[in-house]
Image (cartoon, rainbow, N blue to C red):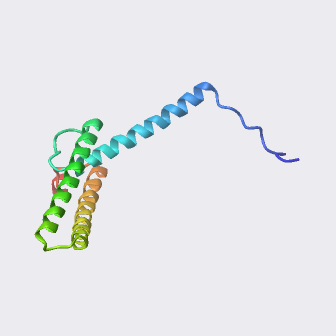
Amino acid sequence: MAGEGYAPKSRLSDKQKQTNHNKSEAVRRAAIREKCVQLAEMMPNWKGKGHQEAKVIEAAVEFLQEQIRRKEELEEQALRSGRMSQGDFEQVYRDEDKKASERHDQQFTTSARRRSSGMGQDESPKEAE
């Protein structure tokens, strides 16, 4: 007979369900908080403005909208000048984006190491010793 030798699955009580839900929510909120801290660290001119999630996200959206607008303006200027085709512009933009991502990854890795070691953003490794 299928299922022989297995104990019947016990059901969770309402209290256990609520406890599990609360733990899951705490983990979810902690993850959001941590990502907002990381996002704030990535934002130019954000230093010292705190890490309130809504404000960080609002500033990030505004920053990204500005970056998109700037890209479109640069593309328009490059095409209007006749010095670059759209394909050339896109290649230059991808190359510059890759360089910026690499710089960011390097800065982000350094920042994450400092956070995990208990060192503040403004502290250098020598100051923390």
Whole-percent x, y for residue 95 in the image: 24, 70
User: Is 56 situated above or below 69?
Assistant: above
Q: Quadrant of residue 81?
A: bottom left
Which residue is pictured at 34% across the width and 40% down the height? 33
User: Is 98 situated above or below 118?
Assistant: below
Which residue is pictured at 65% across the width and 31% down the height? 12
Side of 83 where 93 appears, left or right: right
Which residue is pictured at 58% across the width and 25% down the height? 15
Residue 11 visible: yes
Observer-nearest of 83 and 56: 83
Whole-percent x, y for residue 120 in the image: 21, 48
User: Is 27 situated above or below 76?
Assistant: above
Which residue is pictured at 28% across the width and 41% down the height? 57
Observer-nearest of 120 and 28: 28
Residue 129 visible: no
Q: Quadrant of residue 6?
A: top right
Whole-percent x, y for residue 53 in the image: 29, 38
